[in-house]
């Protein structure tokens, strides 16, 4: 069992920045593909970004490319999402997710989910 706890969400003005963190515990962290999903009220949960276990391969949703950056620190069992140039349409609950896989493919199919952290971007 892996537990994921997100932090770093909050309220920010359009054009601002936030950094989300996801701390993992319970089992080995390095051999999981990690990523982030988000869900706005009344909308389906959608994929945002993922990173492989070694941190040298990433996959981004098109609308966040150039604005969001994912990274991981396996020594700290933590994955980060740096979000710059935030837009109101980025407003959502952001969920950390982990898949029991070493390599990043075209689809992230999580085995574990965090509780979520709220990101609100005002216009």
Image (cartoon, rainbow, N blue to C red):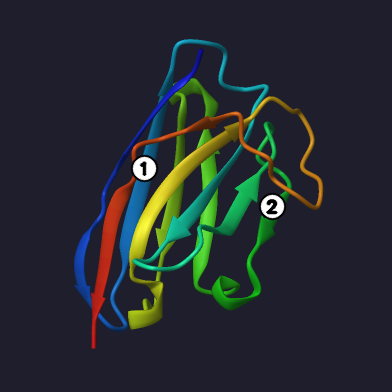
Report the quarter where the C terminus lies: bottom left
- Horizontal relation, residue 115 to residue 102: left or right: left
| Looking at the image, residue 24 lies above or below residue 104 | above
Residue 59: x and y in percent read 69, 57
Residue 37: x and y in percent read 51, 53
SS assignment at label 2: strand
* Residue in the picture at 50% in, 73% down: 67
Residue 101 - label: none
Decide: few, some or many residues near mark 2? Use Cα within 10 Å; few <14, some 14-19, many ≥20. Answer: some
SS assignment at label 1: strand
User: Residue at label 2?
Assistant: 58
- Horizontal relation, residue 19 to residue 27: left or right: left
Residue 87: x and y in percent read 37, 81
Corner quadrant of residue 14: bottom left
* Residue in the picture at 26% in, 49% down: 8
Corner quadrant of residue 103: top right
* Residue in the picture at 34% in, 37% down: 115
| Looking at the image, residue 123 lies above or below residue 3 | below
User: Residue at label 1?
Assistant: 21
Decide: few, some or many residues near mark 1? Use Cα within 10 Å; few <14, some 14-19, many ≥20. Answer: many
Of the image marks 1 and 2, the number of the one nearer the N terminus? 1
- The answer to which of 122 and 66 lies nearer the viewer is 122
Residue 111: x and y in percent read 60, 29
- Horizontal relation, residue 89 to residue 53: left or right: left
- The answer to which of 82 and 48 lies nearer the viewer is 48
| Looking at the image, residue 62 lies above or below residue 20 | below
């Amino acid at each position: 069992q892996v537990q994921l706890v997100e932090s770093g969400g909050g309220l920010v003005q359009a054009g601002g920045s936030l950094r989300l963190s996801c701390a993992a515990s319970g089992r080995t962290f390095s051999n999981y593909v990690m990523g982030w999903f988000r869900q706005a009220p009344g909308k389906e949960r959608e994929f945002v970004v993922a990173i492989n276990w070694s941190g040298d391969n990433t996959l981004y949703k098109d609308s966040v490319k150039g604005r969001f950056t994912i990274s991981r620190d396996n020594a700290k069992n933590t994955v980060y999402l740096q979000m710059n140039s935030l837009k109101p349409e980025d407003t959502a609950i952001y969920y950390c997710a982990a898949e029991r896989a070493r390599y990043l493919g075209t689809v992230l199919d999580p085995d574990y989910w965090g509780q979520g952290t709220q990101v609100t971007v005002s216009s």
